[in-house]
Image (spheres, coloured by chain):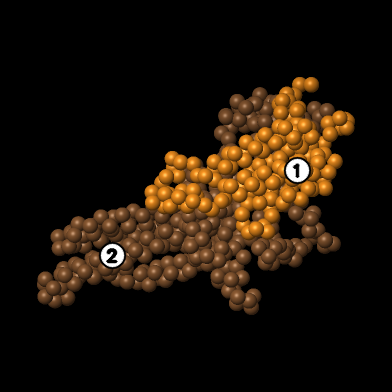
Amino acid sequence: MKNCEYQQIDPRALSVSPLSAQNPAEKKVQRPRRKWEAFPGKNRFFCDGRLILARQNGVLPLTLGLIVVTSGLFFAFDCPFLVEHLTVCIPVIGGVLFLFVVASLLRTSFTDPGILPRATADEAADIERQIDTSGSSTYRPPPRTKEILINQQVVKLKYCFTCKMFRPPRTSHCSLCDNCVERFDHHCPWVGNCVGKRNYRYFYSFIISLSFLTSFIFACVITHITLRSQAKKGIVQAVQSSLCTVVELVICFFSIWSILGLSGFHTYLVASNLTTNEDIKGSWSGKRGAEESGNPYTYSNIITNCCATLCGPMPPSLIDRRGFLPPDEAIPAAAASEMELPPFTPKSDANMV
Amino acid sequence: MAETHSLQDLQQPAVSSKVFVQRDYSSGTICKFQTKFPSELESRMDKQQFEETMQSLNNLYAEAEKLGGKSYLEGCLACLTAYTIFLCMETHYEKVLKKIAKYIKDQNEKIYAPRGLLLTDPIERGLRVVEITIFEDRNIGSGR
């Protein structure tokens, strides 16, 4: 019974901060903490752990703002003119696209990208034991790697010093969020979160729908200006009468290149079952010297790759944000704080059997 | 003795050690655990029983991650409803995870607990390891 600290129960302590192991009723008095409150990574949580975001999310409001403002100007200034001259479908299509874009964006930003919880102390000790060689314990040992065979191809697994475990294949540690993320693609500042296994499909649908939305608004704006200049017999007068349209034109023009480029790039990645991280590092091509299909994860069929990446089963969140912290973890904190209370002196040794 | 004990503490024998069964990545990133019998369990249970448990677990995880018509349908439906459907429906993976939890509880009650072992559901360890806790033999333990 070495782990249990038998302390004389002080009636004062019961009202101050009750020892949570003793009585389930007292646990409720102490408001059980959820796991997200003790999460070690650099993340922010909302709605009591339901939503997760990276701590550095400075550009997300800008992304949302740009989309909302551009679409707002479109609906306010271009739609009335185009509905009159063309068809009522235009705002309908625009509305659907806009809603889809915002939904995908919010989904990407607030979904757990596939964060791997850090290894427990026992696990870490077990791994250390297994790879312990002759080194002394006073300095940090050299980076550890483990080689495994995946589909008859050698893959190196790296040891993560922060999370104290060997990273599974395709997992990478994001330094901005301080988490290991499965199937790590990249950390997107526009979205304010990492893009990984669990939110890649939302990210992809976001950029695709955003490409459509941007192209659609761009086309409508061009049509609007063209029609107006025909009516007013001069492009300058047309532009002068609809300055907001010009603002939209400029925003769309500059964003369309990057977004279309990004969509094309990610379509290529999806078709070949690669991540941005692997592509940038050139893990499977070029360096190996062999054929490009050195990727052990590809299904060698574009359709299967696409389906697997985008329509595959949705893995669960591994970090269990809303679970409650077990009382075992609460006890050391409670016991430590108990020690500090002047009126209460624990007499653990005297009562130990 | 004036102190109170919680019943849980009295019934729980001290933990002796933990064995970790790692993931097997030979088929890619799918969730699969090694079926190799750990040497620490040799005195406690037989190899076949253990391998059967691990194989069933692996099969259940394979079922959860299977790419097929059903999962594609779920994915497409989710996309069309802008992923709002998951607010009211449980994903296929979650359903299988519940099955796995039940299976592990079952195995613990029937096979592992009588031998002083405890399987921890891998989902509680981030699907990294299957943790097997070996409790020390209560008969042997003397004064503390």
Q: Which residue is mark 1?
A: B50
Q: Residues within 10 Å of mark 2 (few under 14, many from 20)?
A: many
- Quadrant assignment, res B26: bottom right
Q: Which residue is mark 2?
A: A217
Residue A144: image x %, image y %? 73, 63
Residue B110 can be seen, yes or no? yes
Label 2: chain letter = A
Secondary structure at badge 2 equals helix
Q: Which residue is pictured at 45% across the width and 56% down the height?
A: A202
Q: Which residue is pictured at 82% across the width and 36% down the height?
A: B136
Determine whether B127 is above or below A267 in the image: above
In this view, the residue farthest toward the left is A232
Q: Amino acid at mark 2?
A: Ile
Residue B129: image x %, image y %? 69, 49
> Which chain does the brown colour mark?
A
Determine whether B107 is above or below A74 in the image: above
Q: How many marks?
A: 2
Residue A109 can be seen, yes or no? no
Label 1: chain letter = B
Please name the color used to draw chain B. Answer: orange
Secondary structure at badge 1 equals helix
Label 1 vs label 2, nearer the camera: 1
**Which numbered marker is on residue A282?**
none
Q: Which residue is pictured at 34% across the width and 53% down the height?
A: A99
